[in-house]
Each structure stands twice: as structure tokens, then as C-alpha cells.
Amino acid sequence: MADTLNTRVARVIAGGAHALIDKIEDAAPVAMLEQSVREVDQVIDEVRAELGRAAANRHLAQQQHLHLNKEHEALSASLSTALDDGRDDLAKPAISRQLDIEAQLPVLESSLAQLASEEKELSGFVDALMGKKREMERAITEFERSRATAASALATHGGSGSNAASKASAAQSAFDRTYRRQTGLDPAAQSATMQQAAKLKELNELVRDNKIAERLAALKAQQK
């Protein structure tokens, strides 16, 4: 994948809603956030296109690798017949072709490994970008919800209550902006994130316990 696309993907993943919250007082914050989501979509499309090219190239390389291996095997059979008949004049061209094939196979195998690695990397980029897009969409939803809540509070209290509601809303917004800026996380999703972390920790511990049990069983089996 081109370095420029790598750089763009890295920039999108490294950024997040917190980088946009700094500009949330702009005239059209929701429009700005939605534009950012569209830009993520564009990068996703570019990565998917690159992924398609890598997959196509790997398929072609696999086909060529398979074809050369079959040709090498067929030449081996022909060589055996030529040698049995004492036809060195026929055996030499077959050996020459085999040598050519043997020179090409390592290059194809290296290319296949590289393309497979590239496909894996690009697939990971698509997953990461989709996750970033969902994160930004949640930021839009939370922002719109917070504005609706603030507007409702102002309409309900009015007068001096409006000042109190405004101050409370401003304080909450300041906290949210600081939290997002420092952590890159949505405050509304903090408890969900903590629950996920707890579940992942429990899963990791379970996997480790299973590995310990398997290793212990294997060692006991060796002693029998």
C-alpha cells in the first residue's frame, strides 16, 4: 500500500472525536462531524480498493505457482523416460526448463508471502477504520443528545433557572471536552469501556488457566 494511504489511515486512527470537540463551538458542529465521517468513508473505500488489488495479485501468483509446480513434475516424468531410453539430447532441454522453474518458484513464494501479509494488514485497517467511524457516529449522537437536553432544560426553567442550567451545561461540556481531549474516549461510553475491559481480563485469565492445565497434562503424559 502506498505510503500516502498508510499515512492517511494512521492519521484517522490516531485522531478521534476528541480532536473535533475543540472546534465544537463552530457555527455547524454537527455538519463538521458528519463531514469527518464522510472523509473516513473515503479512506475506507481507498483501502478496500487496495485490498482488492492485493487479493487479485495474490490469486494470480498462486495460479502461476501451481502451474510451474505441475510443469516441473511433468518434466520429471519426461526426464525419467528420456534417461531410460538413453536420450540425453531430450533430457538436457527438460533439465534446462526445470532449472528455470526452480529459479522462479522462490520469487513467487516470496511474493505470495508479501501479498498475504499486505492483505492481512489492509483487512486490519478496514476493521480499525470501521471502528473509528462508529466512534465518530456515537460522538455525533451524544452531541446532538446533549444539545437537546440543554435546550429542554432552558425551556423548562427559564429566567434565573436558565442561567443555572446554562452554567451546568457549560461545566458539563467543559468536562466532556477535557475528557475527550485527554483520553480520546467518549465520556458516555466510559462505563461500557470499563465493562468490556473487565470481560476481556476475565477471558484472558480463562485462556491462561486453560494453557496452564494443558501444559500440566502434557508434562504428566510425558512422565508415564
Image (tube, helix red, strand yellow):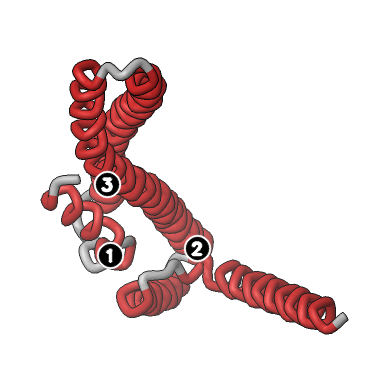
| Farthest-out residue, front | 86
Instruction: Give the label on residue 153, or none.
Output: 2
Residue 223 in the image: state x and y as whole percent.
83, 84
Image-quadrant location for residue 205: bottom right
Q: Secondary structure at mark 1?
A: helix
Rate crowding at label 3 as few (under 14), some (14 to 19) or many (20 or more) other CA atoms within 10 Å.
few
Residue at image x 34%, y 50%?
117
N-term mark: 3 or 2: 3
Question: In this rendering, is residue 53 above or below 121?
Answer: above
- Amino acid carrying mark 3 in the image: Ser
Residue at image x 22%, y 42%?
107
Q: Which residue is mark 1?
A: 14
Question: In this rendering, is residue 122 above or below 66?
Answer: below
- Amino acid carrying mark 1 in the image: Ala
State the CA–CA distance, disc 1 to disc 3. 32 Å
Residue 184 in the image: state x and y as whole percent.
36, 71
Q: Which residue is mark 3?
A: 110
- Amino acid carrying mark 2 in the image: Ala
State the CA–CA distance, disc 2 to disc 1. 35 Å
Residue 89 in the image: state x and y as whole percent.
19, 18
In the image, 127 versus 170, the foreground residue is 127
Q: Secondary structure at mark 3?
A: helix
Image-quadrant location for residue 221: bottom right
Is the residue under label 2 in contact with that under label 3 (CB below 8 Å)? Answer: no
Position of the C terminus, as image quadrant, is bottom right
